Amino acid sequence: MDQTLQTLQPNPLVVEAEKKVFYDCCRRGTVCLQIWMEKNTFTPGEKVIFTTEINNQTSKCIKTVIFALYAHVQHEGFTPGAERRSRLDSSELLRQEAGTPMSCFNTTKIVSTFQLPPLLPVSGGTQDGDIMHTRYELAVTVHLPWSLASLKAKVPIIITSASVDSDSGQLPEDELSPVSPDHQN
């Protein structure tokens, strides 16, 4: 049974997932996964810093944890017969693997950093007339090969074109309105 509890708070952002696993015929245990982020809104080229905590309540060692950033692009359009169609393309932008074995009946904390590519489409909501919508997610996957299962938690990532003031959550004043060509030096 896979359970995911997602708590979205202004500071910090926490996502949790838990899985009860069966292994070695009749043994069972629980693996809990938590991801913490100070924020989930970034600009292209910015560093994404997050902390992952894995609570392994089994008698087996966990050897593989994958951190990946995915982009999901929804394309909207019409066929020659004027039928509305959409297509979702997903791709992995960044990937890291934790190289530290996590012992049984123990909790392991991993702090990770992703450097976002300098060119990324901004995240956007689907509005009338939009032909493309992009969304991003950070996924952490804990592989449990001895139980033929895995545990995954996902955090939505928002990419904006302007930086956001961390104190107020607002755009800086100089980015609120563009300067007209008449007022440039």
Image (cartoon, grey):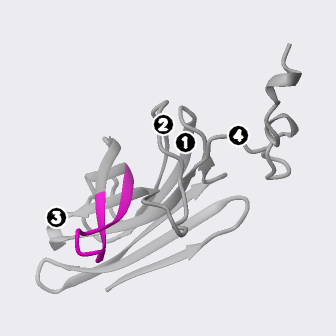
Viewer-closest of 138 and 33 = 138
Secondary element at tag 2: loop
Residue stretch rendered in magenta on the structure: 69-89
Q: Earlier in the sequence, mark 1 or mark 4?
A: 1
User: Where residue 177 sits in the image (x, y, percent)?
Assistant: 82, 40
Whether pointer 2 and pointer 1 mark residues with C-beta atoms closer than 8 Å, the reply is yes
Between marks 3 and 4 in the image, the one whose residue lies nearer the viewer: 4
The one of 58 and 72 positioned closer to us in this rendering = 72
The amino acid marked with disc number 2 is: Leu
Single out the residue that lies furthest toward the top: 185
Tell me the residue that label 4 is attached to.
163
- What's the distance in space between the residues labelled 2 and 3, CA to CA? 30 Å
Q: Which residue is mark 2?
A: 116
* Secondary structure that dominates the magenta span: strand
Q: Secondary structure at mark 3?
A: helix
- What quarter of the picture does the C terminus occupy? top right
Q: Which residue is mark 3?
A: 145
Q: Secondary structure at mark 1?
A: strand
**In the foreground, 9 or 33:** 9
> Which part of the image, by quadrant, shows the N terminus?
bottom left
**Can residue 83 be found in the magenta stretch?**
yes
Dot placed on the residue nearer the N-terminal end, 2 or 3: 2
Which numbered marker is on residue 98? Answer: none
Q: Is residue 14 left or right of residue 106?
A: right
On the question of residue 101 being in view, the answer is no
